[in-house]
Image (cartoon, rainbow, N blue to C red):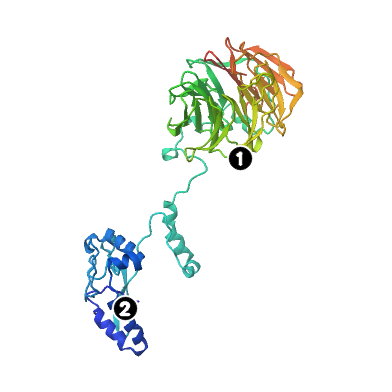
């Protein structure tokens, strides 16, 4: 197809057509084509009814050359001038494309070809760059013969296209991290390569930290072993803190993003973000380096417990002062699933291995049995698997999973801990019961040691109890705090390090 654009150094359109018509082989075809051009008028009726695609072309050209098209889209006579300058459209609007606004030189937009007998023409070469993020089409022949050209031509498009990552990235200018997550403690280094760690019973007080002004609801070590010198704490004083609880016992940073008591906090799997929720009904995912909220949303109820999904780290579930439990997706900042039950409050949530099912403990008890005290849920379908797991009239403020066996423990307000199977129908082990400590209405936490040999719990009297998992006997108990000890946690790497917190705002590290 010949070009409709001519230049000073080339023949006119009329001369070229005469040369083509004089050729006997192409005479009929060129006559038909010219006849079509002269009889087809570009009008508004043709745009709307017969050729709807022409209307889109007019609109696009109007965006490029708004001065070349009549606003009323009046019929335009089909005439071809001998010269058409770049940037003007004297013929039909659907036939011409103005490249003046593209800012490209004439040499880049045209090339010389020979048409007919000794007739020099320049035809348009569509070399306009594609839209941002869209790869240009390259013929199969060029892809096979010139793979290097393909690589160079698509390099810019690949760099411009942004794919959503499976995890949220931090804003680390210059790939620089502060000393919070770039330093490995000298005390932890010798234990990082150890394959087998046997938990030892702590004997002495190492650090005592008293900077919180309210009860400390929870303490948790960073799950990343290299950064496990950091300890996270949530308090009723509307703050949560990150501590260096291995080397110095000092507070590294305080976060004040909540307007109410912070009830629960959770480390992210990468150890650089903290998910927090509290009585202000707000959810925050905070970058511990910068203190910036990477995710913030208001929940419909006060939050008492949070848990990340063990497989999909972008999803977490939250429960609180509501009959429903909600699953959130951080990437979309939306609620993706809702689990409804006839309860008033969710006390704790525990994911079972592989994350297909999870358990929730509630404050719902009946007269004769604790119906719906512990409920098993199917994570994907939101269906209740079982609500007849625990049949005693006590609520369970804490649930914890054994690191090796298919069992979990429920802390009860009956001053004992009950052992259950993680396999359906989640039967209780009546031969093992961990008792002697007192709970008495406090949300006392419990946790297994990393090797699974010890089970630790606080008590309303401020004491710490360590039980042998297999025999359910008390190995050691000692006075740790003056007020109720509500949170206990073992260090993931160091075999004898142990952290506790109490209702008076005090945190202690034991060794």
Q: Position of residue 380 (x, y in %)?
A: 60, 40
Mark 2 closeness class: few <14, some 14–19, many ≥20 residues within 10 Å: few
Front residue of this view, candidates 22 and 212: 22
Residue matched to label 2: 36
Q: Is residue 108 visible?
A: no
Front residue of this view, candidates 229 and 318: 318
Q: Position of residue 326 (x, y in %)?
A: 54, 33
Quadrant the N terminus occupies: bottom left
Front residue of this view, candidates 454 and 206: 454
- In three-dimensional space, the C-alpha distance between marks 2 and 1, rounded to whole angstroms, equals 63 Å
Tell whether 242 sits left or right of 472. Answer: left
Residue matched to label 1: 381
In the image, farthest residue toward the top: 482
Tell whether 77 sits left or right of 446. Answer: left
Q: Image quarter for residue 485?
A: top right
Quadrant the C terminus occupies: top right
Q: Name the residue at 41% across, 54% down.
A: 133
Q: Position of residue 480 (x, y in %)?
A: 61, 13
Q: Secondary structure at mark 2?
A: helix
In the image, farthest residue toward the right: 431
Q: Secondary structure at mark 1?
A: loop
Tell whether 93 sits left or right of 154. Answer: left
Q: Name the residue at 48% across, 46% down.
A: 164
């Amino acid at each position: 197809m010949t070009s409709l654009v001519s230049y000073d150094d080339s023949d006119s359109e009329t001369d070229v057509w005469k040369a083509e018509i004089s050729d006997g082989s192409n005479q009929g075809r060129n006559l038909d084509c010219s006849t079509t051009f002269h009889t087809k008028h570009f009008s508004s009726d043709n745009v709307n009814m017969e050729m709807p695609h022409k209307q889109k072309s007019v609109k696009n050209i109007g965006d490029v050359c708004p001065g070349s098209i009549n606003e009323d889209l009046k019929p335009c006579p089909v005439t071809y001038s001998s010269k058409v300058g770049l940037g003007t459209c004297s013929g039909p609007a659907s036939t011409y494309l103005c490249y003046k606004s593209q800012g490209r030189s004439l040499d880049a937009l045209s090339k010389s070809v020979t048409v007919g007998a000794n007739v020099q023409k320049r035809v348009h070469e569509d070399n306009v760059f594609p839209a941002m993020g869209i790869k240009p089409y390259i013929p199969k022949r060029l892809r096979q013969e010139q793979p290097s050209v393909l690589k160079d031509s698509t390099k810019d498009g690949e760099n411009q296209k942004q794919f959503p990552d499976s995890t949220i990235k931090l804003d680390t200018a210059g790939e620089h991290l502060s000393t919070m997550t770039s330093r490995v403690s000298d005390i932890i280094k010798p234990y990082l390569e150890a394959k087998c760690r046997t938990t030892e019973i702590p004997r002495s007080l190492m650090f005592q930290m008293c900077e919180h002004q309210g009860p400390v609801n929870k303490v948790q070590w960073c799950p990343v072993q290299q950064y496990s010198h950091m300890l996270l704490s949530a308090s009723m004083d509307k703050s949560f803190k990150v501590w260096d609880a291995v080397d110095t016992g000092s507070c590294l940073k305080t976060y004040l993003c909540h307007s109410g008591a912070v009830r629960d906090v959770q480390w992210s799997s990468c150890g650089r973000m903290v998910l927090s929720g509290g009585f202000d009904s707000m959810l925050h995912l905070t970058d511990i380096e910068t203190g910036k909220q990477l995710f913030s949303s208001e929940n419909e109820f006060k939050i008492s417990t949070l848990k990340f999904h063990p497989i999909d780290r972008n999803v977490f579930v939250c429960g609180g002062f509501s009959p429903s439990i909600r699953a959130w997706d951080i990437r979309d900042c939306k609620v993706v699933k809702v689990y409804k039950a006839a309860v008033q409050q969710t006390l704790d949530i525990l994911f079972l291995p592989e994350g297909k099912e999870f358990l929730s403990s509630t404050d719902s008890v009946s007269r004769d049995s604790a119906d719906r005290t512990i409920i098993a849920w199917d994570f994907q379908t939101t269906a209740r698997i079982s609500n007849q797991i625990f049949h005693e009239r006590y609520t369970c403020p804490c649930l914890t999973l054994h690191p090796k066996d298919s069992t979990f423990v429920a802390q009860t307000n009956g001053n004992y801990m009950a052992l259950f199977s993680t396999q359906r129908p989640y039967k209780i082990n009546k031969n093992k019961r961990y008792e002697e400590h007192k709970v008495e209405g406090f949300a006392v936490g419990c946790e297994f040691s990393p090797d699974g040999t010890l089970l630790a719990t606080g008590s309303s009297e401020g004491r710490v109890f360590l039980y042998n998992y297999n025999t359910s006997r008390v190995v050691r108990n000692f006075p740790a705090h003056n007020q109720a000890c509500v949170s206990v946690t073992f260090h993931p790497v160091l075999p004898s390090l142990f952290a506790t917190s109490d209702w008076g705002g005090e945190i202690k590290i034991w060794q």
